[in-house]
Image (tube, rainbow, N blue to C red):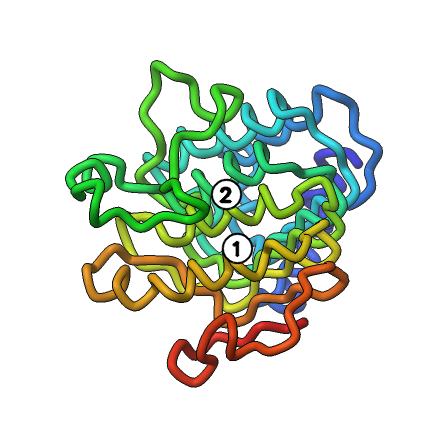
Amino acid sequence: MQLQDVHTRLTTQHEDNPSTVELDLSSCYMERTAPYVLGRLFASLQLLELRWITSLRLDGNYFTDDGFGAMLSTMSAANEKQTILPVLRQLYLNNMNLDRRSVAGLFAYLFPVDLKATHRIPPSEALRIAGNRVSRPSKAYIAADKRGPTVPLFPSLTVLSLSDNPGMGTTGLIQILRSLLAVHYEPHALSVMDLSRCGLDRAASRYLHEYFEQLSRAIDTHCYPVVPRRFVLMGNQHGIADLHEIYSPKTTGVQLVL
């Protein structure tokens, strides 16, 4: 796809319905340099039509940690100064060979953690998943000599689809839950998180229970935890038979889709 093609597609959609503008880059068999190029493209003012995007699809493209991290970092650096994709509501990263490292890096940019506030919490009061709280992602995503983001990369995000990434596994779910339960700079309203066919095993139920068990305390202490209104877990060997053993749907307002 050429730059002019992107311009034409976005303009046509915007003229037809400005509330629904999708950029679909699924299964484009991108080269290793692609995420670096995409990061610079989204961060620049070269194509103002990109600001209209409400839905972005990158399904089926495999990025290295270095490439994916560089893309997110480049976009975030520009986003800290001015929101680059202000109306992006839906993000689809299905079948992208994501693992625990890449989801930890991704979530650091989607839902920035206030590390200063985190470190002020006494260890005895810290909210933990699998015995630990959220930590910095690998240096491929945030270099050791750089501070993390303070502004969410996509502030209007409501749908996050990460399905068909079996390499994520339960260790990836742990990273996600730690990020959701962490201390954030601001509230986030996420309607759907799709983790279908992501290689979750029976241990996943225990960590989901830990998340929901601590959720009310995170809310009461103004940590701004991220609470997806719908968790989609279809196609995983999570072994969950009774939802009420994990959480209270009525109390939390959250729906687990098994």
The answer to whether residue 25 is visible is no
Among all residues in the image, which is located at the extreme bottom? 250
Q: Residue at x 72, y 40 (%)?
A: 167
Quadrant where the N terminus is found in the figure: top right
Q: Amino acid at mark 1?
A: Leu
Q: Position of residue 35 (x, y in %)?
A: 65, 28
The answer to whether residue 77 is visible is yes
Q: Position of residue 111 (x, y in %)?
A: 40, 47
Which residue matches tag 2?
Answer: 175
Q: Residue at x 42, y 53 (%)?
A: 180
Q: Residue at x 66, y 45 (%)?
A: 169
Q: Quadrant of residue 212?
A: bottom left
- Dot 2: within a 10 Å radius of its alpha carbon, few (fewer than 14), some, or many (20 or more) residues? many
As drawn, 43 above or below 221:
above
As drawn, 98 above or below 214:
above
Which residue matches tag 1?
Answer: 88
Position of 157 with respect to 63 (left or right) is: left
